[in-house]
Image (cartoon, helix red, strand yellow):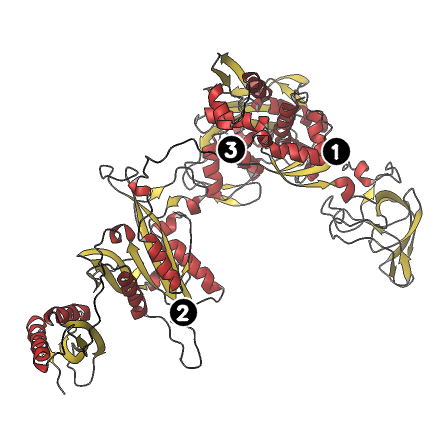
């Protein structure tokens, strides 16, 4: 937010330098992010007069001018088509920096004639958008006057960062209140008295509120016989300095009041209001409405609208409609000043993608006690600037007045929290200076009434924070001693760090994977892929972050899409994070009705390894991702895990996927991502992933490794190949081989899978290497043959296999 130094001084008198004011505001919790001194910005710019203007002898498009700027007469070569003798203009002397372009004015040869300055346009000065020619000033402009003084630009503008809770500081009045409290002074609010005519506003318009929750208070005034014209220079320049674009006197006043006291207003062309009635109601589902920016929006029944007897006129608290805007033909104005429910405005603005100065303030909460003052102040200025008259009275529909909050503060508690000796008298003084009204007080505590504009104050700790910042954080000496004994407390089981989380992360990083960290929130469209019962957020930052994610996949897929778009295809990524699921409330969970599940997601794409001179590039495939899953589970010492092909498609995986089973329970999936899902996320290349439910994996039985002496005797290897039906899983057969081999077997590995020549249709040949060893002797052929024969018998019997010979 941009704040004017001169404007602040109209509210409260102070003599601080800009740097001192910067320090004070920062100490009060209002960060000054930057400042612009316009006296410096427009240094060496003066009002000048063109004494002579002749065509340049060496150019048809240039003029050679003699310019008097009070101190001297300079020769200036000018390219503007509208420059002429006798004009008052803005002259940039040598040493000036042109605001728009940033270059320094120096003597320059232009087509063999020396130019000693520059005649400026409105756009070059950043005083408007007109770049068609030089800025011509009225004849009354005083030659030699610095333009900062002439335009009222001799000001300092602060760029202030306001935290979301301090809605009261989104205006000059709000910042002035902080300075006044710091100085223990009163704020001087501008006069809002209105000379009214004999017309009664009650006879001109009626107001009806149909949704009292979304619109607790609505006021209206009528200003007659206005003349739509440009605002005076002081108003336009004040708006420009604060980042607003002047439009006309009526609209400019509403923007001026918003910057002055933080209350958004809206002016309607009264002649365009049908039935002389204002109705505050919600929109119809699917209703279409065109806003002032000439864009059409589709509405729903959650959005509050300002309507007349026949149609919608404005999206309440967000933006007005094209059908009731102020135009050059407007003669009568209806002025709206209202209090809208912050949550309602925030949701509407986010859904429609409309962030306006009005919605920015309404969604944080405006002062419900300031509604009438802002209306009076605006009506007074509109009448003065347009020659209009204000009808007598104000329509103020306020069916259920909002009660001011009361908060109790314990003196000892405040001292304990702040960590400094602050007397009761000092606390009383600070809170009173901040406009908190003391309504009850005793030796131990006081109770205050919270001003309507302090929407951030609700609890005792909020008042303690107010005392701390007024006391000045720099005056609080740091104390690093601990007085709380936490030795007897334990962290809830659900909040404890799982033992395996760190080993999983370290293993994957060591294997060359990069960890991603994404938000727990996602959008409705992505959520619909994974669940029909999402965990919705009550007050989301926007629709794209309105649901607690049911899966880690959407964020991971977006990350991959972004990398692919940047031609980074060789990816090895993982994320450990939470997913959120709705369940029956009678199930025991940390948050009733919500299951918070920890998941591991691994994704790979591109080449399996970097191409090099000795090895050709190979794209990752199903066996790569399965191998990663197998190696990870083995490294984690998970006991008795296996992989089974999926029977039904499990989104976002394709059918080229296996489920990971640990002791008969599915803990995850590994395989290829469905092409349908990839298309939804604009991913054109194959992608393979592993998804593991870590809550279940953490409970899996783990192997306990013990030292085993390496046998000094030679190993014996035997190879067996079986022809079996394709329906059987190779892993299932391998486990049976290992089981049938007896105690002397050390390992069973698959070294070949073959289909084709000499193998019947529907059959497959699977070859195994079986390794034997004994710790105390060399194995005999008889011992090994007995094991091999038992394997053959069991495999033929259980799987109908045929031993492949030769």
Position of residue 461 in the picture relative to residue 183 (left or right) = left
Q: In the rendered structure, are the residues bearing label 3 and label 1 in contact, judged by CB atoms less than 8 Å apart?
A: no
Q: Closer to the N terminus: mark 2 or mark 1? A: 1
Q: Nearer the viewer, residue 433 or 319?
A: 433
- Label at residue 234: 1
Q: Position of residue 628 (x, y in %)?
A: 31, 65
Q: Secondary structure at mark 3?
A: loop
User: How busy is the neighbourhood of tag 1: few (under 14 within 10 Å), some, or many (20 plus)?
Assistant: few
Vertically, is 60 above or below 785?
A: above
Q: Secondary structure at mark 2?
A: loop
Query: Can residue 794 be seen at all in this image of the molecule?
Result: yes
Looking at the figure, which quarter contains the C terminus? bottom left
Q: Nearer the viewer, residue 233 or 86?
A: 233
Q: Position of residue 445 (x, y in %)?
A: 47, 16
Asked where in the image residue 641 lies, by quadrant, the reply is bottom left
For label 2, the residue is 606
Residue lying at 30% horizontally and 61% vertically, measured from the top left: 653
Q: Nearer the viewer, residue 409 or 197?
A: 409
Residue lying at 20% horizontally and 80% vertically, measured from the top left: 755
- The residues bearing labels 2 and 1 have C-alpha atoms spaced at a distance of 63 Å
Position of residue 102 in the picture relative to residue 522 (left or right) = right
- The residues bearing labels 3 and 2 have C-alpha atoms spaced at a distance of 54 Å
- Label at residue 669: none
For label 3, the residue is 479
- The residues bearing labels 3 and 1 have C-alpha atoms spaced at a distance of 52 Å
Q: In the rendered structure, are the residues bearing label 2 and label 1 in contact, judged by CB atoms less than 8 Å apart?
A: no
């Amino acid at each position: 937010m941009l704040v004017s130094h001169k404007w602040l001084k109209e509210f409260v008198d102070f003599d601080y330098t800009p740097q001192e004011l910067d320090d004070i505001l920062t100490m009060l919790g209002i960060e000054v992010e930057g400042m612009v001194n316009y006296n410096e910005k427009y240094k060496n710019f003066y009002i000048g007069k063109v004494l002579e203007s002749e065509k340049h002898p060496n150019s048809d498009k240039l003029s050679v001018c003699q310019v008097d700027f009070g101190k001297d007469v300079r020769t200036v070569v000018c390219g503007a088509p509208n420059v002429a003798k006798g004009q008052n203009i803005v002259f940039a002397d040598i040493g000036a920096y042109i605001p728009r372009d940033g270059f320094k004015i120096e003597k320059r040869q232009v087509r063999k004639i020396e130019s000693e300055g520059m005649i400026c346009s409105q756009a070059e000065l950043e005083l408007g958008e007109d770049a068609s020619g030089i800025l011509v000033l009225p004849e009354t402009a005083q030659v030699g006057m610095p333009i900062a003084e002439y335009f009222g630009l001799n000001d300092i503008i602060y760029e202030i960062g306001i935290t979301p809770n301090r809605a009261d500081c989104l205006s000059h009045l709000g910042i002035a209140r902080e300075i006044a409290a710091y100085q223990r002074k009163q704020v001087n609010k501008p006069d809002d008295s209105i000379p009214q005519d004999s017309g009664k506003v009650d006879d001109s318009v009626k107001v009806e509120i149909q949704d009292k929750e979304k619109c607790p208070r609505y006021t209206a005034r009528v200003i007659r016989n206005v003349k739509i014209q440009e605002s005076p220079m002081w108003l336009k320049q004040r708006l420009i300095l604060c980042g607003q674009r002047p439009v006309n006197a009526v609209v400019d006043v509403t923007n001026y009041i918003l910057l002055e006291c933080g209350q958004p207003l809206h002016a309607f062309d009264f002649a365009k209001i049908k039935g002389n009635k204002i109705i505050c109601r919600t929109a119809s589902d699917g209703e279409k409405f065109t806003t002032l920016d000439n864009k059409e929006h589709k509405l729903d029944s959650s959005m509050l609208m300002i309507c007349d007897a026949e149609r919608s006129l404005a999206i309440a608290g967000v933006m007005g409609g094209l059908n009731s805007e102020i135009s050059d033909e407007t003669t009568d104005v209806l002025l709206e000043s209202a209090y809208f429910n912050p949550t309602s405005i925030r949701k509407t603005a986010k859904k429609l993608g409309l962030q306006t100065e009005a919605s920015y303030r309404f969604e944080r909460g405006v002062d419900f006690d300031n509604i009438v003052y802002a209306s009076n102040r605006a009506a007074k200025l509109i009448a003065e600037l347009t020659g209009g008259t204000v009808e007598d009275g104000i329509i103020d529909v306020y069916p259920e007045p909002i009660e001011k909050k009361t908060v109790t503060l314990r003196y000892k508690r405040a001292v304990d929290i702040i960590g400094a000796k602050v007397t009761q008298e000092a606390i009383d003084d600070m809170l009173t200076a901040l406009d908190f009204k003391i309504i009850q007080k005793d030796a131990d505590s006081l109770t205050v009434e919270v001003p309507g504009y302090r929407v951030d104050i609700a609890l005792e700790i909020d008042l303690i924070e107010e005392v701390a910042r007024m006391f000045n954080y720099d005056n609080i000496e740091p104390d690093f001693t601990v007085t709380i004994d936490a030795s007897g407390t334990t962290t809830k089981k659900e909040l404890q760090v799982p033992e395996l989380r760190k080993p999983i992360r370290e293993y994957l990083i060591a294997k060359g994977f990069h960890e991603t960290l994404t938000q727990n929130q996602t959008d409705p469209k992505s959520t619909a892929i994974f669940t029909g019962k999402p965990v919705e957020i009550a007050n989301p930052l926007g629709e794209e972050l309105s649901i607690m994610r049911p899966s880690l996949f959407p964020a991971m897929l977006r990350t991959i899409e972004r990398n692919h778009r940047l031609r980074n295809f060789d990816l090895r990524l993982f994320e450990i994070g939470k997913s959120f699921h709705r369940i029956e409330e009678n199930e025991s969970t940390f948050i009733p009705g919500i299951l918070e599940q920890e998941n591991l997601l691994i994704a790979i794409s591109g080449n399996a390894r970097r191409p090099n001179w000795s090895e050709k590039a190979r794209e990752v495939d199903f066996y790569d991702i399965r191998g990663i899953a197998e190696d990870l589970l083995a490294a984690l010492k998970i006991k008795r895990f296996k992989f089974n092909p999926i029977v039904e498609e499990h989104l976002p995986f394709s059918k080229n996927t296996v489920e990971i089973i640990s002791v008969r329970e599915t803990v995850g999936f590994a395989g290829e991502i469905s092409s349908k899902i990839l298309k939804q996320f604009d991913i054109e290349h194959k992608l393979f992933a592993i998804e593991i439910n870590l809550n279940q994996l953490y409970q899996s039985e783990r192997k306990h490794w013990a030292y085993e002496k390496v046998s000094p005797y030679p190993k014996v290897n035997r190879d067996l190949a079986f022809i079996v039906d394709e329906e059987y899983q190779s892993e299932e057969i391998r486990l049976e081989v290992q089981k049938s081999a007896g105690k002397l077997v050390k390992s069973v590995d698959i070294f070949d899978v073959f289909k084709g020549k000499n193998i019947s249709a529907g059959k497959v040949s699977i070859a195994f290497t079986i390794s034997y060893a004994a710790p105390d002797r060399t194995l005999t052929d008889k011992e090994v043959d007995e094991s091999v024969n038992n394997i053959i018998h069991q495999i033929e019997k259980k799987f109908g296999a045929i031993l492949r010979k030769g």
